[in-house]
Image: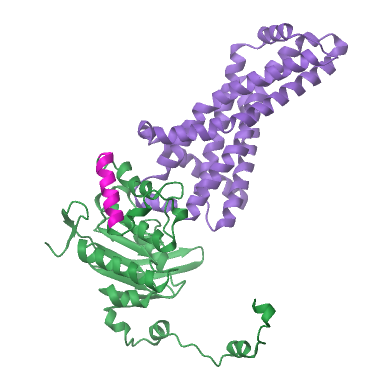
Chain colours: A purple, B green
Amino acid sequence: MKQLTLILEGVGSTVELLIRAASYIGTLPRQFARFIDQCYEIGYTTLPIVAILSFAIGTVLALEAGYSLQDYGGKDYIGSLVGLSMARELGPMMTAILLAGRVGSAITAELASMTVYQEVDALVTMNIPPAKILVLPRLAAVTCMMPVLLLIANIVGWFGGAVVARYSHFIGIGPEEYFAALRQFVKFKDVMNGLIKAEIYGFVVVLVCCNIGLNTRGGPREIGAAVTRAVVASLVLILVLDYFVTKVLL
Amino acid sequence: MDCHATRNPFTGAEAPAVGVKVEGVSKNYGDLQVLKRISFEVQPGEIFVLMGPSGSGKSVLLRQISGLESPTAGRVTVGGLDPRLAESRDQVRLALVFQAGALFNSLSVYDNLALYPREHRLGNERAIREKVLHALRILSVEETAAKFPADLSGGMKKRVSIARALVMEPQLLLYDEPTSELDPVMAATITEIIGTLKDEFKVTSLVVSHDRDLALSIADRVGILMDGHLISVGPPAELHAPKNPRIADFLNPKIDIKHPRFKQLESAPEPTNQEAS
């Protein structure tokens, strides 16, 4: 019962934070520098790990698909399989999980530290709403950066699959055939569905991490606990949301 | 100059000084009652020092007055307005100097001070620059402008924190333990600064401290808080010969050197040369 109350309180405070941040949306043009800083943090610094992981997933997908399909003469469809998997499911899911681990944890640590060391209180006494300068630029940045990260993840993953399809001895499909199959089966709608998923997951991750950071109470030890809680909550939310969003988008 | 008018440190313009009214304030955290029906007033333009031992609820009371927390019961007004509301803070400028400074670690000292005027659009960047440098000059820390809070000593942090409060052109200045963790010389300097700001700019000041020297040298009135109760309010002269034995014990603690603890220290073996080195 106590756990349920805590979860409901968390949901309530997260929604409240979203409403408060949204109420300052008109100030975003004046916060352009903060927005760019956050785009750098969320987009640029996450890009290398997203690219590496996408490439790895693309190669493994192609390898597994090639191995399984070789006996059934289905090797020609490897491009479509890798393409659809990356665009519709693995791309958005993996990018959101990486965002939670790489960016979400950093956001929670920073905001929790600011809360514990009374920097957030200082903002309140200066009549500068924390939701305006600490949350809104991050939400705006993740909204802009998630599609970019996802598109790069998809493209790198597709190329990873193409490399394995070309050089693996039991597949041996050239890039032309691989990308022809990918183009034939991966529609614009599939890519868009992935983008919608990534936007939702990324937004939720940043919002939840901001909320947990700003609600941290206690001393330095609580900062670490808050980071763990934020990453776990983000991962659970991504997995739960994934089912429902996928169902809606089917 | 009106004796109840605050003088703007930058423009010299006068604004009405504000008072603080605390009426029957109680604060509970779960089952723990930290503040118990506290009532007092801080008159416009005065320095009110709130003293008490650690854990007596001084900083909690300051959080209620600054609007950072809501009392469980009772009411706080600053200049007749509720300090928790953003609209009130627009009308009555209230600045809080935190115990540990609470400077924004990711910003330089200059940007720490410039944040308030920038966010509230109080002039162009040139005017803000002049104001920030002037505030740093008043506190004699202009050389720290380009530094980051992590590079400052404790005393410097306190001064920068006061300078940041000053940039807000406050009508009410709240200080939370301004001389804690400072050496006696720096503590005296900070005490002098608080007194000077009051004399120069007539800012109403509420200082939370357990520093007796600070209270004696700058306070107009002193309140003593113990176990969540405000047990005394009066002029600082009363601190010389307090009638209440609890206040006397707090202000003039007697260390019993015959206590067993000190006996143990006495009988402890002398360290050998190797241990000492």
Quadrant (top left, top right, bottom left, bottom right) of the N terminus of chain B: bottom left
Q: Which residues are magenta?
A: B124-137
B43 vs A214, left or right, is left
Residue A130 belongs to the span the image colors magenta: no
Residue B134 belongs to the span the image colors magenta: yes
At x 51%, y 51%, the residue is A113
Is residue A215 visible to us here? yes
Is residue A11 visible to us here? no
Residue A240 lies, with reference to residue A160, above or below; the image says below
Res A231 → quadrant: top right
Instruction: Residue B58 in the image: state x and y as whole percent.
Output: 40, 69
Q: Nearer the viewer, residue B111 or B73?
A: B111
Instruction: Residue B220 in the image: state x and y as whole percent.
Output: 25, 73
B275 vs B166, left or right, is right
Instruction: Residue A119 in the image: state x and y as whole percent.
Output: 44, 52
At x 39%, y 53%, the residue is A122
Instruction: Residue B193 in the image: state x and y as whole percent.
Output: 29, 65
At x 59%, y 14%, the residue is A189
Q: Nearer the viewer, residue B19 or A8?
A: B19
Residue B80 lies, with reference to residue B273, above or below; the image says above
Quadrant (top left, top right, bottom left, bottom right) of the C terminus of chain B: bottom right
Identify the main secondary structure in magenta: helix
At x 34%, y 57%, the residue is B141
